[in-house]
Image (tube, rainbow, N blue to C red):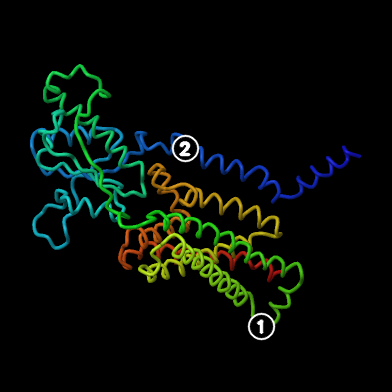
Amino acid sequence: MIGLLIRNSWTQLRRDRAAQVLAFIVPIAFFSIFAVIFGGGGNRMSGTSRVAVAVVDEEKSEKSRALVEALAADSGLRVITTAAAPRGSRGAAAETTLTRAAAEAMVKRGDVPAALILPPGTGAAIGSFDGAGAKALVLHDPSDPVAARMVGGLLQRAALRAASANGGFMGRVNKGPDEMMPLRYEEQAVLGEKRDSPMVAFYAAGIAVMFIMFSAAGAGGALIEETDSGTLERVLTSGLGMNGLLLAKWLYSTTLACAQVTIMFVWGMLVFRLPLVQHVAGFAIMTVFTAAAAAAFGLVLATMSRTRQQLAGFANLLVLSLNALGGSMFPRFLMSEGLQRASLIGFNAWALDGYLKVFWREAPLAALAPQVGALIGFTALFLVLARRLARRWEAA
C-alpha cells in the first residue's frame, strides 16, 4: 500500500506542470540568479565591473596629475574627469573639466556612487606622514556603502604608485603598503545626512513593489475561479465583453495596489519618520503608474494560467526572479554593470529607481519622466498581451 501511494504521488506530480515548476524550476532559477550576483558576474572588482568615480583635480600639479593617472590605470575604477559641455555654450569643446560642484551633482543624481576631490595641497600630502598638506575628500552616496570604502582603498594604492613614479616616500620605498597611509582622506555623505532614518524609503519601496506584484497576481486569479464556476461565461454574454471585464479587473487591481503602497508608506512615516508629506506629489505619481503596471502584469499571469496551481507557479517564478534582479532583495548597486542593465527588463526596477529619485535623491518631478515613461510602456504591453491571451475564453 505504501508503495502504491508513493507511485500515485509521483504520477500526480508528473501530470501537474505547476507543481513541477515550483519543485524544480524555481529553485534552479533562484540559484542561477544569486550565483551570478554573488559570483564572478557580480564582483565589482572584476575587470568588467568597475566602480565609477568622478575625480576633480583642484591642485593641477605634477604630483596630483600623476595620482589621477594612477587612479585611471587601476582596474577597479572607472575614472571620470570631464562632463558634457552645457547646452548653448560657445566653442568646439564637447566636454569640460569636472568641478567640485559638478561632481557633487553627479553623486546626488546617482550618475556615480562617489566622487574624489583633490584640493590644493594634495601633492604635498602624498607620503608626508607628518600631517602636512590637505586631505582628499570622498563625496559619496550612503545608499551604496561599498563604493566609498573601495574608492578610499584604491586611492591609497594609486598614491603608492604615484609616489613610486616620483622617487618614493622619503626613503620608505621598501615598506609594504600596509605599513603606511600614503594619503589621508575624509568621507562626506551628500545625501541623507539630515534624516533620522535615511534608508527607510529605500527598503519601503523595494518591499512594497514586490508585494503588490504578488497581490496583483492573486487578484487576477479571480478570472480562473470565475471560469471554473461558470461566472465568466455569464459575464461575457451580458454585453460587458472581454474588454470591459479585463478593464474592470485591471482598475480594481490598480486601486488595490495603490492602497497597499500608501498604507506601507504611511506606516513608514508614522513609525520610522519617512518624509512622505514632503514628497507626496512624487510619491503619488510613482505609486499610480507602478500600481497600474503591476495590475497589468497580474492580468498577464492570470490569462496565461489555466489553474490556480499554474498561476502560483508562474507568480513565484517570475515575481521572485524579477525582484531578485530588480533590487527588492539585493541592492542593484552591488551588482555588475551588465546585471544592472539586464535588470531593466522588469518594470519593478524602473519603479524602484523612481521611488529612490523621489525620496532619496529629492529629484524634481520632471526627472521622473524616464521611469514613468517606462512604466506606461510596460502597462500597455501587459494589457495587450493579456487581451490576446484571453481570447481562449471567448473561443471556448
Q: Count residues near mark 1 (Cα–Cα under 10 Å), then give few for <14, some for 14-19, many for 20+.
A: few
Q: Amino acid at mark 2?
A: Phe
**21 over 175 or under it: above or below:** below
The one of 77 and 122 positioned closer to us in this rendering: 122
Secondary structure beneath label 1? loop
Instruction: Name the outermost residue toward the top.
Output: 174
Picture coordinates of residue 350 (x, y %)? 42, 58
User: Could you say which quadrant of the image residue 49 lies in?
Assistant: top left
**Residue at coordinates 69% horizontally, 82% vertically from top-left?**
238
* Residue tagged 2: 38
| Residue 211, picture quadrant | bottom right
Q: Decide which of 271, 110 is in the foreground and name it.
A: 271
**Residue 106 shows which numbered tag?**
none
Three-letter residue code for mark 1: Gly
Image coords of residue 147 (percent x, y): 32, 42
Q: Position of residue 16 (x, y in %)?
A: 74, 50
Q: Quadrant of the C terminus?
A: bottom right
Viewer-proximal residue among 72 and 303: 72
Task: Please tell me whether mark 2 sits on a helix, a strand or a loop.
Answer: helix
Which dot marks residue 239? 1
C-alpha separation, residue under disc 2 versus residue under disc 1: 54 Å
Q: Residue at x 21, y 50 (%)?
A: 103
